Amino acid sequence: MYERIVIKLSGQAIAGGAGFGFDSTSLTHLATEVLAARATGVQVAVVVGGGNVFRGNRAEEWGIDRVEADNIGMLGTVINAVLLRGRLTALGATDVRLMTAIPINNLAEPYIRLRALRHLEKGSVVILACGNGQPFTTTDYPAVQRAIELDADALLVAKNGTDGVYDADPNRVPTAERFDRLSYADVIARGLNVMDQSAFILARDHRLPLHVFDIDARSAATAICKGEPIGTLIS
């Protein structure tokens, strides 16, 4: 059983089936899953994406440069993080800490590694927003980075509607097979699309286990925390 985990939640998971914007039912489900994982006794941090609000790779479409677009995307993660904090609190959690890589003092604490570790040790759910505060990265990289910084036992990569890593796109290839377990070398050799390559290489170099699973599946994160073989484990 793990003692400390980081869960990477995409903005799309907050948007639900729409893929953009916000869905109240999906938000409640995500918050419930986070609290259920923590109820197992595991320390939980959550890195939130912002793709349901704005994606930095749409810079050209909007006629702005990539740095500005990524800044907007980071602000999108803050919106999602505040929403998640609000729903966690509404569900009865009184010890939720929101930390941002870019200082937004009226809404959140600045991310300070030692302070985040202290919050986790006290049993608080720690939500991490703004990625790592730098442009030209998706939230995959800071999710791995924060997991390593916080000495997490594993990173849970929550997918929306996909229950693991397959040898082909299961939405297009009905015969696609899901892997229960892979090594880092297997993923690279097969050219499997798990996350951004730079993030994956960072996880490999620091031997950070990755659990790729479907966040829509009830109690999946809890089962992983208990050591059950859910989704795909990359180690």
Image (cartoon, helix red, strand yellow):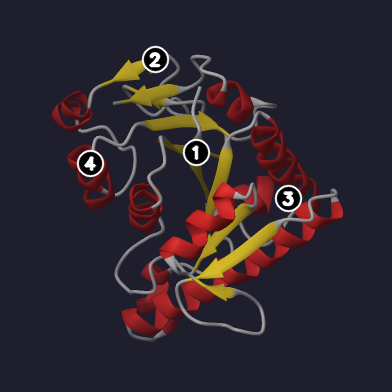
In the image, taking residue 15 as reference, residue 59 lies left or right, namely left
Q: Amino acid at mark 1?
A: Arg
Amino acid carrying mark 4 in the image: His
Q: State the CA–CA distance, disc 3 to disc 2.
A: 28 Å
Residue 9 placement (x, y as % from top left): 54, 48
Q: Compared with residue 33, is residue 140 higher up or lower down, i.e. above or below? A: below
Residue 47 locus on image (x, y percent): 51, 54
Kind of residue at disc 2? Asp
Q: Which residue is mark 4?
A: 206
Which quadrant of the structure image shows residue 126? bottom right
| SS under mark 1 | strand
How many C-alpha atoms fall within 10 Å of the one at disc 2: few (<14), some, or many (≥20)? some
| Of pointers 3 and 2, the one earlier in the residue sequence | 3
Q: Mark 1 — residue? A: 4
Q: Is residue 124 above or below residue 5?
A: below
Distance from the alpha carbon under mark 4 to that under mark 1: 16 Å
Return the residue at label 2: 180
Left or right of 153: which side holds 229? right
User: Which kind of residue does numbered mark 3 sit on?
Assistant: Leu
Residues tagged 4 and 1 counted as in contact (Cβ below 8 A): no
- In 3D space, how far apart are the residues under numbered discs 4 and 3 (Cα atoms)? 32 Å
Judging by the rendered image, the residue that carries numbered circle 3 is 27
Which of the two labelled residues, at mark 2 and mark 1, occupies the earlier sequence position?
A: 1
Q: Nearer the viewer, mark 2 or mark 1?
A: 1
Q: Position of residue 34 (x, y in %)?
A: 66, 41
